[in-house]
């Protein structure tokens, strides 16, 4: 424990004391926030509550509660890792949240933060319309957060979650087991759609690697703890998406839909596919970078 933290260990006592102290340390370290919180105060609160194994909604009730010495040591150890190593908090705690659900994460997978959560919570409406959906693919599943959230949202669905990374699939398997969904979420290893021959779906939901070379070179340190395989996708960030668009129709049932996130590479999509019939989704919370396209639109566009 560093000398400043020794002082905190000796002189601070309550959960609120350590929340304030952690926030000060984070502000002074000029950390980047983007893995569940957007500022030092919220991140400090999340760190303290998770270190105490308590849900965030209880923070007001325990503000004046005194911490034990072991609890103080855990909070300060986590804070040290967050500040000096720039480790994102979910990698320190092993916990991330998506669609209100808790997931295990480590540095083998991206930390869940996709706006696709809003689509799942809305049942993919109004874009789904009256289409009947029975089989869903979570492509580039990582922690399997999308697959598992879909399973909760629609208990009748058969769901396949695939990823190129065996390490990611090991994390996904842990989450599938954690949520007791082994009979409903099937995990498969696949490089894009290449290893899913003959598999067809009513819905393909994909949060692929889409960070372009410039953005990869300028990412904050926090993001460099995440697997580059799940982030980088060539000079323009679209290497994976190009392959997906060329093959997705073969894996969609008639009337099937592809939902795909491309984030900041949306501008490259506009440039490279100026006439493509993508529907770009507007999110209530101001996010963007997700498009949808139907099997029939894809076939017409590719053949045209």
Image (cartoon, rainbow, N blue to C red):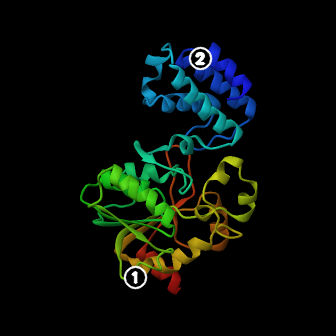
Foreground of the two, 154 or 18: 18
Q: Residue at x 37, y 52 (%)?
A: 149
Tell me if I can see residue 111 in this picture.
yes
Q: Residue at x 59, y 34 (%)?
A: 78
Q: Residue at x 36, y 82 (%)?
A: 198
The picture places residue 199, in percent across and down from the top left corner, at 36, 78
Q: Is residue 157 above or below residue 249?
A: above
Task: Give the left or right position of residue 203, taking residue 26 as reference.
Answer: left
Foreground of the two, 137 or 55: 55
Q: Secondary structure at mark 2?
A: helix
The picture places residue 290, in percent across and down from the top left corner, at 53, 59
On residue 197, the disc is 1
The picture places residue 75, in percent across and down from the top left corner, at 57, 29
Q: Is residue 256 above or below residue 171?
A: below
Foreground of the two, 60 or 298: 60
Along the polypeptide, which appears first: circle 2 or circle 1? 2
In this figure, which residue is indicated by the disc labeled 2?
17
Task: Give the left or right position of residue 127, taking residue 24 as reference.
Answer: left
In 3D space, how far apart are the residues under numbered discs 2 and 1 (Cα atoms)? 57 Å
- How packed mark 2 is, by other alpha carbons closer than 10 Å (few <14, some 14-19, many 20 or more), is some
Foreground of the two, 45 or 76: 76
**Quadrant housing the N terminus:** top right
**Circles 2 and 1 in contact, beta carbons < 8 Å:** no
Q: Secondary structure at mark 1?
A: loop
């Amino acid at each position: 424990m560093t000398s400043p933290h020794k002082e905190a260990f000796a002189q601070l006592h309550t959960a609120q004391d350590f929340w304030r102290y952690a926030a000060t340390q984070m502000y002074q370290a000029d950390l980047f926030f983007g893995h569940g919180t957007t500022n030092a105060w919220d991140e400090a609160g999340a760190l303290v509550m998770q270190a105490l194994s308590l849900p965030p909604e209880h923070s007001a009730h325990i503000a004046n509660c005194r911490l034990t010495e072991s609890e103080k040591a855990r909070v300060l150890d986590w804070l040290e890792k967050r500040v000096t190593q720039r480790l994102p908090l979910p990698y320190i705690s092993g916990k991330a949240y998506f669609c209100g659900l808790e997931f295990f994460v480590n540095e083998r997978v991206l930390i869940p933060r996709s706006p696709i959560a809003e689509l799942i919570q809305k049942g993919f409406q109004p874009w789904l319309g009256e289409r009947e959906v029975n089989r869903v693919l979570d492509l580039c599943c990582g922690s399997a957060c999308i697959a598992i959230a879909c399973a909760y949202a629609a208990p009748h669905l058969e769901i396949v979650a695939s990823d190129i990374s065996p390490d990611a699939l090991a994390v996904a398997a842990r989450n599938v087991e954690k949520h007791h969904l082994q009979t409903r979420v099937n995990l498969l290893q696949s490089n894009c759609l290449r290893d899913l021959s003959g598999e067809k779906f009513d819905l393909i939901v994909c949060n692929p690697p889409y960070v372009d070379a410039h953005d990869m070179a300028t990412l904050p340190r926090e993001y460099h703890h995440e697997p580059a395989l799940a982030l980088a996708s060539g000079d323009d960030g679209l290497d994976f998406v190009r392959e997906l668009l060329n093959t997705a129709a073969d894996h969609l049932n008639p009337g099937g839909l592809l939902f795909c996130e491309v984030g900041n590479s949306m501008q490259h999509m506009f440039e490279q596919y100026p006439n493509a019939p993508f529907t770009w989704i507007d999110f209530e919370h101001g996010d963007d970078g997700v498009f949808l396209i139907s099997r029939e639109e894809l076939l017409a566009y590719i053949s045209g």
